[in-house]
Amino acid sequence: MFKKLLSTKAIKFSIALCLLSALFACDNVPPKFLNTDITGSTAFNPNFELVDHLGNVRHLADFKGKVAIIFFGFTQCPDVCPTTLNEIKEVKELLGKDKDKLQVIFITVDPDRDTQEILAQYVPSFDPSFLGLRPATPEALEQVVKGYKIFVQKDYSKDGKNYTINHTAGSYVVDKEGKLRLFIKHNQGAIGLVNDLKQLMN
């Protein structure tokens, strides 16, 4: 009887151990993102030193503790930039109780025209929590463009007096530890991005 009881306890212990091992195994499974996973890529240098639309010098490390979406554009952009910012606004709303864990960062690739004052009017008009950043020098612009592998090219009018800017339309996602994790192609839709952000937040 004692041997039978001992055998039963051993079996139960073995089952519990297996279940525990399975649980830990599940925890170690990497998340499956719907957008492009660039985790661990050495091709990027996401750190920056830029000035926000309030006049403060900001670094990527300032946003640790939050998941950040970083989008490059310019305020005179007629379509891609406002469309993307409106989509990200929708994403924030869909996050529900997790919306305060998100920081949206708009980095201008047109600092000559996008002054601090203009950014302060433009970026928060989509959402008061959205932050506009601008390079203070041409070198700072070059550094951040190279760091994120962004394509930027001025396209001048025939008379050479005006220009628009062709630029990469995608966005980047940085996790709570300040590590670059995702590349978001333009017009991918809010639902998939919400799914990916929630995984990084929770």
Image (cartoon, rainbow, N blue to C red):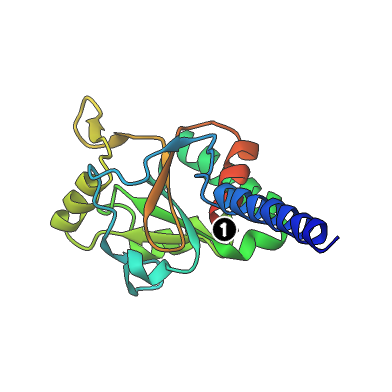
Circle count: 1
Which residue corresponds to the image point at 27% horizontal and 59% vertical from the top-left?
Answer: 47
Which residue corresponds to the image point at 26% horizontal and 35% vertical from the top-left?
Answer: 151
Q: 161 and 182: which one is in front? A: 182
Q: Is 65 rendered above or below residue 79?
A: below
- Residue 112, position in %: x, y? 25, 53
In-image side of 138 versus 61 (left or right) = left
Which residue corresponds to the image point at 51% horizontal and 50% vertical from the top-left?
Answer: 28
Q: Is 189 rendered above or below residue 28?
A: above
Q: 4 and 119: which one is in front? A: 4
Q: Secondary structure at mark 1?
A: helix
Which residue corresponds to the image point at 37% horizontal and 67% vertical from the top-left?
Answer: 52
Q: 110 and 139: which one is in front? A: 139
- Residue 183, position in %: x, y? 41, 39
- Residue 60, position in %: x, y? 34, 64
Quadrant location, the N terminus: bottom right
Residue behind mark 1: 201
- Farthest left residue? 139
- Farthest right residue? 1
- Farthest top residue? 158
Mark 1 residue crowding within 10 angstroms, few (<14) / some (14–19) / many (20+): some
Q: Is residue 78 visible?
A: no
Three-letter amino acid code of the residue under disc 1: Met
Q: 185 and 129: which one is in front? A: 185
Residue 126, picture quadrant? bottom right
In-image side of 8 versus 55 (left or right) = right
Quadrant location, the C terminus: bottom right
